[in-house]
Image (cartoon, rainbow, N blue to C red):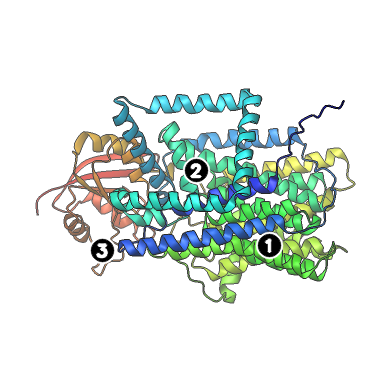
């Protein structure tokens, strides 16, 4: 008599990836109501219908990619050890970021979109929970969140069971895809009816700030603010951790074409490249988009090299997440299409037209995602979505921005990487990485942000990998001592540049490459921040509920601080005045403030209003304010100052 044993069914990775794709897409387009357009209810319902149609088609295409027949091959296990190296690299980087983690949020960047919006939403969620419970919920939420993280870390069995449950849900949803899509359609309809009935999105004020950038970064930050409170270090830490993830993917990508020391060089360059390091200290979202782009390219390039179906799916998933995170992911699709065409013409494995169709389908899924978002956001946003022909001046301007952003020696290393790959007998890595770098270089040169290092960073990733491979060629065959000293010297130079290189800037002279005012280190931190914390204290002391506060600095985080210090019952207006029809004078500022019904005016003493306003003009408000403005206080922070005035009479 034989006994049968129940053999567990192995998990299906395709179903998990399909589940994650569908969930991410649906949450970002439906739950975060990108369909809530200005206009009538019928306009919003039509937009929702378009979204759900696109969602269904793209989900079916993603499932088709998972069922596409590819030759099954056994690949050697990937060597991703090097734990000591990553521990030292990430530990050192985190320590070096600590002095900047809790500085006030920078003015002059898009922080009202990246920090203020999730901060305000989280604040209102916590307030609603506190009102329902009858006591402050923030300590309870923070304790519960940290406890859940501790359980996940210290109890691997519980973590494994949770993953198994999610996998079983994913398997069921993939096996009943039609029913799952119908269920989501019903939930979406009920959810839309509730939002249309309550007009909840409009309670958050300006819809432009809700829809100007893709939702994913806000969906990551908002729960963290809910559970941990509105703290400046949260947004910065998230970007730094994204940077670490991107470094890990570039390390693995460099190992595909090179050796261990080239991979280490790629990780070091990514973590300590000056613009990437400095954007980690802002509340911008560059760390996240670089992570998603690096992950997408790693899997897509590995698919080109190894023909593994899971890599095609993972690359498509990360490319879609990149398109849900920031519009600079636009270069992913043409770059991968070029790689697929190159691989079709010069195959490493046997290729057919069906393989090319699968690669192009993988481009269509994130491409449609990005185009649909851009069209929807165009109704609510000032974000430019048009491209212009890449003139030689724009193309060369982006190249000239490289040494300004990363220093001359690193720019030379970038150039050496391209030349070295071009001269190698096997030029396959050159053409693949050139497709990555070139696509984004051209697209960036076609956009309104040409010459801006922040927008150009995605093609710096390709330059990092090419330079790391050249580094690997130079180090191969040398002694272990030489290899270690060389890597230490590279790290030391980059760290010095990040922390101590002179970053004093005159916004009237520097170009876009350095003009984002986000290169903050020990040389200029006291010129970089405004003391919004103290401003919130004074607003609490002097203002009352319903007061209108006029602070015409563009792209600054006052809204975040009003929420953090429970001043949301004040009305904050940031209508700029520098591009108005009237000449800019002290009286026009006062006239604009009164037209807005403001009782209070907040202005900086320095360069933080905006590049179009001269610091000398701002000085007049501190030395000779116009009649009708009564000085209340001047708030210093380093070399910067904020002034608060009471607006009196007519």
Mark positioned earlier in the residue sequence (2 or 1):
2
Element at badge 2? helix
Circle 3 residue: 584
Estimate the x, y position of residue 209 in percent, counting from the top left.
38, 54
User: What residue is shown at x 67% (from left), y 66% (from top)?
Assistant: 360
Residue 421 visible to an observer of this rendering:
yes
Element at badge 3? loop
Circle 1 residue: 436
Mark positioned earlier in the residue sequence (1 or 3):
1
Which residue is situated farthest in the right direction here? 477
Label 2 – label 1 distance at C-alpha: 27 Å
Residue 504 visible to an observer of this rendering:
no
Circle 2 residue: 220
Element at badge 1? helix
Answer left or right for 23 relative to 550: right
Nearer-the-camera pick, 73 or 544: 73
């Amino acid at each position: 008599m034989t006994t049968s044993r129940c053999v567990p069914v192995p998990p299906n990775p395709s179903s998990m990836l399909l589940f994650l794709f569908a969930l991410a897409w649906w949450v970002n387009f439906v739950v975060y109501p990108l369909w809530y357009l200005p206009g009538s209810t019928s306009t919003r319902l039509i937009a929702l219908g378009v979204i759900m149609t696109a969602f269904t088609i793209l989900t079916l295409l993603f499932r088709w990619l998972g069922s596409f027949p590819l030759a099954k091959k056994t690949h050697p296990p990937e060597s991703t050890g090097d734990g000591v190296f990553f521990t030292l690299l990430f530990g050192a980087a985190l320590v070096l970021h600590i002095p900047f983690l809790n500085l006030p949020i920078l003015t002059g960047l898009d922080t009202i979109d990246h920090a203020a919006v999730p901060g305000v939403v989280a604040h209102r969620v916590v307030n609603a929970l506190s009102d329902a419970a009858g006591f402050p919920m923030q300590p309870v939420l923070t304790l519960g969140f940290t406890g859940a993280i501790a359980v996940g870390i210290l109890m691997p069995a519980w973590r494994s069971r949770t993953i198994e449950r999610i996998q079983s849900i994913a398997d069921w949803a993939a096996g009943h895809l039609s029913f799952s899509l119908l269920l989501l359609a019903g939930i979406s309809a009920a959810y839309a009816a509730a939002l249309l009935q309550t007009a909840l999105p409009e309670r958050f004020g300006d819809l432009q700030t809700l829809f100007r950038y893709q939702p994913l970064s806000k969906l990551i930050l908002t729960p963290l603010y809910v559970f941990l409170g509105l703290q400046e270090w949260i947004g910065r830490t998230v970007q730094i951790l994204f940077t670490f993830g991107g470094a890990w993917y570039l390390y693995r990508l460099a190992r595909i074409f090179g050796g261990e020391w080239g991979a280490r060089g790629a990780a070091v360059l990514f973590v300590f490249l000056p613009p990437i390091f400095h954007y980690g200290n802002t509340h911008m979202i560059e760390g996240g988009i670089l992570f998603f782009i690096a992950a997408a390219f790693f899997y897509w390039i590995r698919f080109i090299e190894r023909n593994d179906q899971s890599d095609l799916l993972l690359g498509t998933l990360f490319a879609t997440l990149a398109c849900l995170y920031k519009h600079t992911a636009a270069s992913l699709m043409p770059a991968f299409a070029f790689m697929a065409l190159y691989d079709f013409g010069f195959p490493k494995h046997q290729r057919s037209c069906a393989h090319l169709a699968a690669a192009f389908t993988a481009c269509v899924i994130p491409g449609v995602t990005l185009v649909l978002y851009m069209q929807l956001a165009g109704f609510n946003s000032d974000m430019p979505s048009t491209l212009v022909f890449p003139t030689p001046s724009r193309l060369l301007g982006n190249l000239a921005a490289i040494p300004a952003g990363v220093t001359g020696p690193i720019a030379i290393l970038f150039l050496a990487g391209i030349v070295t790959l071009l001269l190698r007998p096997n030029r396959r890595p050159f053409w693949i990485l050139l497709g990555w770098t070139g696509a984004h270089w051209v697209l960036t040169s076609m956009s309104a942000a040409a010459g801006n290092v922040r927008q150009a960073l995605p093609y710096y990733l390709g330059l990092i990998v090419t330079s790391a491979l050249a580094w690997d060629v130079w180090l191969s065959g040398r002694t272990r001592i030489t290899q270690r000293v060389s890597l230490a010297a590279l790290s030391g130079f980059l760290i010095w540049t990040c922390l101590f290189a002179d970053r004093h800037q005159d916004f009237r002279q520097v170009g876009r490459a350095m003009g984002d005012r986000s290169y903050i280190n020990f040389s200029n931190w006291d010129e970089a921040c405004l003391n919004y914390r103290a401003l919130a204290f004074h607003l609490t002391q002097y203002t009352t509920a319903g007061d209108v506060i006029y602070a015409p600095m563009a792209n600054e985080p006052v809204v975040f601080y009003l929420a953090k210090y429970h001043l949301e019952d004040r009305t904050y207006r940031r209508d700029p005045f520098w591009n108005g029809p009237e000449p800019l004078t002290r009286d026009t500022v006062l006239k604009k403030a009164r037209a807005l019904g403001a009782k209070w005016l907040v202005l900086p003493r320095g360069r933080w209003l905006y590049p179009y306003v001269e610091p000398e003009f701002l000085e007049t408000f501190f030395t000779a304010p116009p009649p009708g403005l009564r000085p209340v206080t001047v708030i210093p922070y380093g070399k910067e100052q904020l002034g608060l005035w009471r607006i009196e009479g007519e």
